[in-house]
Structures are given as C-alpha cells and as structure tokens.
Image (cartoon, rainbow, N blue to C red):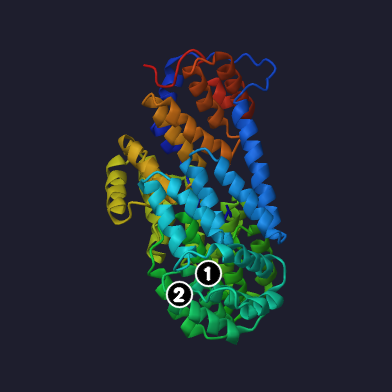
Amino acid sequence: MNKTMRKLLIIFAAFAAISNLTAIAETIPAKPLNLKAETNTVNMDMVIKDNFVKAKYASAENRFLQGNVKASHDDFADLVARAVHDDYVFLVYGIKMAEYGFFDLSDTLFKRLDANTFTANYIKDIKQFYYPSGMVEPKDLIYYADAYSSIVYNNMAIETTSELLNNSGTADSDYKNYLVALGFYKSNNLQQALKYINNAIVQNNKNINYKILKAKILADSNKSKQAVKLLKEINKTEFLTVDFQEKIRAVEEYVEYKIAKDEPLKDYHLSYYYHLQGKSLLATKVLQASILQAKQYAPQIFGLLGRIYYECDEPLRAQEFAQRAYKEDKDTYLAALTLADISYDERKYEDALKYYKTAKKLSKENDASIGIAKTYLAMENEKKSKKLYEKLLKKDSLDEDLLAGSLKVFPQRADDYLARIASVDISNNEIWLGLANLALRDGNVSMAETYLNNSYYIDENNFKYYYYLSLVLRAKGNIEQSNQSLIKCSRLDSDYASKVNLDQSVYEK
C-alpha cells in the first residue's frame, strides 16, 4: 500500500513495559551466543512465501502503472485466490484494490475478513473514501480501471476523457462521472471537471475521494472560499485510521497552498503537502529555496524544516532550524514541539517540559499534552503522568501515540491498547511485535506466528522479529532453527541479543 508520512511512535519503552525480558536480563547471567555460520533454515517457508508474494504484487502493480490493466487484475486476482487467511494482508491488498478501482477484488477480501474492531475500522474508512454508490458492473470494471490508469499514470487524460464521454456502452454512474471529472482536471479543463464531479457527488454524497477532487478543482479555480467550506465539510467525516487521516491532512495543505497569496506561504504549504505524501527531500528543497525571500514567514518555514528533519531522524539539523524559528518567534508551534521532542530524547526533561507546555498553548493537537505526560513519567512523577494520560484517553481512545505512551503507566492494559493501535495503523511494526509478545505470554503460539508473519511482511530485518520467532520455533520443538533465529537477531542487534538466555523463554518464571 502507499506509504504516507506516519506519526513517529516512541514505543520501545512501552514494549518493554509489557515484557518480562528486562527483568530476566537483570537476574540471569547472559550467555554469549555461539555465532556459528548462519544457515538458510531460519523460517525458510516464510522467506519463500514472502518473496513470491512481493514479486507477484510488484508485477501486478507495475502492470497497472504501465496501463496493462487486464493482466494486472489477473495477477492481483491470483494473489487474492492464493492468499491464506490473514486480516493484515487482506487489508493491505484491499486498500490498493479499492484505489485502483478493482472493487470486485477488494470486496472479495473484505468478505473473508474476521469480524472485529481491527477490520471494521479499516473497512469503514476504505469504503467511505473510495467506494461508489453501487458495485461497478463486471463488464465495466476493467474498462474503468484502465481509464484510471491512463489518466493518472500514463498522461492520457484528454484521450481517455473523450472516450469515456463517447462510450454509450457503460452505464451512467457516480464512478464514471468521477473518472470524467478526474480526466478533465488532469487536462486542466477545470470548468468541465467541476461539472462532472458535481454530478458524481449528487449521485453519491458519501464518497470523500469525490469531495477531495472537488476541493482541488475549486482551489485551482481560485474559488478559495468554496474550497475552504468544502474542506470543513470533509473534516466532519470521521476517519479512524492513520492512512486516511493523513490523506485528509494532505489535501488541506494542498488547498492552503493553492489559495495562499504570498510565495513564501505557498512554498510552506506545498512543502507540508509533499512531506505528508512521503516526499520529504522534495519538501526540504522547496523550503530551502524559499528561505531568502521568507522574512515575514521565516519562523514558520524554519519550524517546518526543523520538524521534517526531526521526523526524518536528523536531530542536529532539526535542532538548528527549530532553534532559529523559536528565536524569531516563540509562538511557532512546530518549533516548540520539535525542541521539546529533542530535549526529551536527550533526557533534558526540564527543558522538554517547558517546550511541551509552550506548544500546548499554541495548538489543540494531542502531541504536546502526550509529551507532557511522558515527561512527567520520566521525571518520576507518576501521579501527574497517570492523571494526564487518563484525562487524554477519555477524550480520544484511538490516538496511537497516546495509547502507546500510556502503556508505560498502564502495562496491564496492553492486550486492549495494542489491539486498538493495530486497528488504526496496520503498518506499525512494533505493534505486531508487541501482539506477538502477548500471544507468547498466553501460550498461543499459532497466533504469535500470525502476528510475526505480519511483522516480517513489513520489515524482514527487524531484530526483535527474529527473537520472537526463536521463541515460536522453540515452542514448536525446532531447537536448531530457534538457535539460528537468535543468531540472526544477534547479527542485527548484538546488544539486544546478548541479554537473551538460550535455555529460557522470556515468559518462564
């Protein structure tokens, strides 16, 4: 699935809070691992399966992007048919199928999902974002998907739009009107684009993707008041999952970019838009180029630069720009938040608290309040930390940063909170590892293996994956493979692996 910019999670401490690993490491002398030559026996079935799936998926995606849509659909259909039941994989595929207009495949996947909060949140968001008012007729499905590919990826907006309008063999529908509007928009015929997107919305007022396209058309047509009004309407629709929340945030920045009058302010919003789409390098280039002409907007630009560098794991550059922004204007929210996060990371908790409190005054977002709660905890003021976490959780029980942070003061809630985080952010690898940890604690080896499969799909080189895999293999009696998995863990992170006792499970007393 598309990877947009995700909120950073400081989860490792929470992870440790739900595991007995630390306690074991302190009480049992560490045994050095026997680092013999690593074999290819560690989870080889998963490696073969994963390589096949990724190759098949990449082939299907490339064919779609190149306009070979029927072959792409066949490849995806083959993957769907072969897929062993796994809610995570089904949802990853389902998002992509819905985006491409392969609604038959996404619907097939959704019908195979287990009924739970995790799947319900994603199905709800996917359908209200992408789905037409009724299922596309089978005879039209490939044709429409081909039109989408041609318009978006193959620079054929004009020809494709004309063909859509002249094809009397396809029924009039909200989705067809959307594609025609998209074609006119991509060919810069904004008046016609607005006409057809209005038709689509009249036929289906629930589809948010249609409204997002209309907001962009209005913004590009210099109808700023109408665009902003529509954005407010879009924001009334609740999206529970991070993927779709960020799509809304991105379009907000795009509209702000289009309606801004001053060039430096346009650059600011355009850069934010790029960053939210995962194009952080491009975002920093735009901001760097605008610095000389910024002046009035310098604090905002420096603040955003600092934030982008922080989220791209460049703390020194982040601190440099955040300090410049804060020096020029202490009311720059992103600067205060970034300086708070950096101070916290450096264990300068008094400074962190000061900056978080400043940031809290400047924004209604949860970030600063969560920062204050975790800082109180780091300063060993558990009473204040718990009180603040409880207050925040009453207001928002599905904020992943909040849930993750609160696990350190409420470790007994891990079973509930980790599942909640998974239900709003399926790409959070630490959560799958945490759920695997809990499954092992409860002796549910089969479920732990399922969670680890998801983790492997996200990041096959995560050292903690190989540690928990070693426990699964040991529980299944595969001692040699278990030891090899620990060796793999040690190669990826020797400090972590050195604390591991080969003869004792993490959950043995």
State how far apart marks 2 and 1 are (Cα). Answer: 8 Å
The residue under the point 49% across, 64% down is 130
Check the image and report above or below for 278 versus 443. below
Q: Using the rendered image of the protein, determine whether residue 257 is visible from the camera's viewpoint.
A: yes
Disc 2: CA contacts within 10 A as few (<14), some (14-19) or many (>=20): many
| Towards the viewer: 416 or 303 | 416
Q: Label 1, on which residue?
A: 251
The C terminus - image quarter: top left
Q: Are marks 2 and 1 in contact (CB under 8 Å)?
A: yes
Query: Circle 2 is placed at which residue position?
Result: 231
- Of residue 497 and residue 66, the one placed in the foreground of this image is 66
The kind of residue tagged 1 is Val
Q: Residue at x 31, y 35 (%)?
A: 412
Residue nearer the viewer, 115 or 491: 115
For the point 47% across and 84% down, the residue is 225
Res 286 → quadrant: bottom right
The amino acid type found where label 2 is placed reads: Leu
Q: Which mark is residue 349?
A: none
